[in-house]
Image: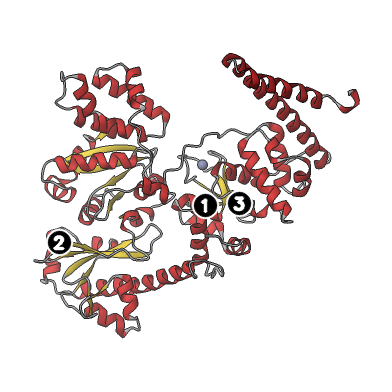
Amino acid sequence: MHIPDDQIERVRAAANLVEIVSAHVSLKRRGQNHVGLCPFHQEKTPSFTVSESKQIYHCFGCGEGGNAISFVMRMEGIEFPDAVRRLAERYGIALAVDRTGGGGAKRGEERERVRRVNELALAFFRERLAQAAPDAPVRRYLDRRGLDARMVEAFELGWAPDDWQALTAHALGRGQSRDDLVLAGVTAKRDSDGRCYDRFRGRLIFPIRSADGQVAGFGGRVIGDGEPKYLNSPETPLYHKGSILYGLHPMRKQGGQRPWVLVVEGYLDVIACHRHGLTDTVAPLGTALTEDHARLLSRHTERVDLVFDGDNAGRAAARKAAMVLAPFSLDVRIVTLPAGEDPDSLLSGAGVEGFRACLEAGRPMMDYLIGTCLDGTYGAPIERRLKAAEPVLEVLGRMTDPLRKGHYLGKVAEALGVDERALRRRFGAVRPAPSQAARAAGSAPAPARTEPGRPPYGEDLLMHLVLQGRVDTRWLAERIAPEAFTDPRVRRVAAGLKGLAAEGRGPDALLDRLAGEPDASALVAGWLSREVTVEGDPVDCALACVAAVGRRESQEVHRRLLADIREAEAQGDTPRLMALLRQKDALKRADRPAAAV
Ligand SMILES: [Zn+2]
């Protein structure tokens, strides 16, 4: 999929970064810029800066940075073309050339149609609940569950009458098309004769809003008899159950980072917690936690408490969740409830104090895993204990934070009663590759920033001058090859600039070229957002930088050559050694100033 440059530029010109960032970060104006708490690292004082005039963001804390497209890529965990398409949808730009036959625009239009139907259905369901008689079964159910008017309002609960045509007829009467109703999943179509009927009948309705507040779909709990007990919207252009958390939208309305977030299982658990003042509670929707969920969570908090049943199924679910959450820097605790209880039942039985006592007894994820896996293996042969510890080692293998990993490796070694070094060696063998799906979706957790440091001074300053427009892109391309830079990020930036210069373009489109390279993009955003001050002519300054880079390059070549020579000597590889020595001679001659030859 290739999106032509002029299309990308149209999208970039239309996008408003302040608006886009504001959906995720609460921004305050400060002088020329907007600042807020960085969504990419944990911080208490804002160092995340958005420049409206330049349409770039830069975090002075963690070094993240980029433009609207890279922000959407990072936040949504999607690839460059998808981010461009998403912005095009949002700003109503039809991407003219699209090999899927206008697929992007079509998807955007479909999402809009589903959104309209869902809004209409939401109003319909709510109205029907408001009209229900006080002794209607749904009212009696709400009373029994302690769902008062305040909760009905806060969670926008509704009622789908026990009728095959109520909503469908209502929506058709308001000009919606049958196709759109089916697309949104509120109406189902019978395969045999194509007849359409209401999907939700005789159910209490829980509207599901995505993090950005759109009504993505619905969940319905049957009132009275009927199967299944819970029914959710099918996957639609708006509703993807693996990336929505119920309760996240009301939580986000409170704004900012949350100290900790509770993850429970169902709608009623979320609402019960909310009712008892635990408002930072969310639930996945009839599915195990996914990487998308983990990413959403890590954007809002540092600590996640997962509530599970104390039974075998609960233990298996906790292990699965640990695998998914391990790569994220989240402090995860596992809370187990007494057999047969869920948060809703526990809260109505033991009250908020009883529930809080369970929460407080929660254990850090790795301690919990070590405990449950090695339980009952004390004194068993070491091979059996190692086998039992395998789930723990697998989760360890997925951790990306070396400090946490090292800490728990020590703990596991101690629990097993084995030498830590031996465990480290064995450990290397159980590290699994990132999941296929995650890689295919390009949504594997972002690798830990490997090199947050600045490039060497000369390279840093030179690029800063170019990106600030003090030195021309072509000037740079003519004087120094991208390969001459020692910092790999600068090399990629220089290559991008060279390509743009060849097309007679300035550095504006550079961030798009570097979209897949967060390290290089972050540097560019930094150079774009900070003014550079030099004494005298910037071109003289740039020339001095080029010379410094050239010197460092020849030193680097020299160093590598010497290392190769030593290696060839050690291996007794005479032909290679001779070739290397000839190279060294040639280099010496080339290095000598011309006048001295
Ligand atoms: Zn940051």
Left or right: 564 with respect to 267?
right
Asked whether disc 1 touches disc 2, contact meaning CB atoms under 8 Å apart, the reply is no
Mark 3 crowdedness (10 Å alpha carbons): few <14, some 14-19, many ≥20: many
Disc 1 versus disc 2: distance between alpha carbons? 40 Å
Q: Amino acid at mark 2?
A: Lys
Q: Amino acid at mark 3?
A: Arg
Q: CA distance from mark 2 to mark 3?
A: 50 Å
Residue that mark 1 sits on:
71
Provide the secondary structure element on which disc 3 rests.
helix
Q: Earlier in the sequence, mark 3 or mark 1?
A: 1
Asked where in the image residue 115 lies, by quadrant, the reply is bottom left
Compared with residue 560, is residue 162 higher up or lower down, i.e. above or below?
below
Q: In the image shown, does 174 or 427 lie closer to the viewer?
A: 427
Where residue 541 appears, as percent x and y from the top left, is 80, 37
Mark 2 and 3 residues: CB-CB less than 8 Å, in contact? no
Query: Foreground mark, 2 or 3?
Result: 3
Q: Residue at x 45, y 71 (%)?
A: 106
Which residue in the protein does label 2 denote? 229
Q: Is residue 535 visible?
A: no
**Which mark is first along the chain, 3 or 2?**
2
> At 46% from the left edge and 51% from the top edge, which residue is drawn?
75
- Quadrant where the C terminus sits is top right
Mark drawn on residue 289: none
Q: Nearer the viewer, mark 3 or mark 1?
A: 3
Q: Would residue 241 be found to the left or right of residue 141 on screen? A: right
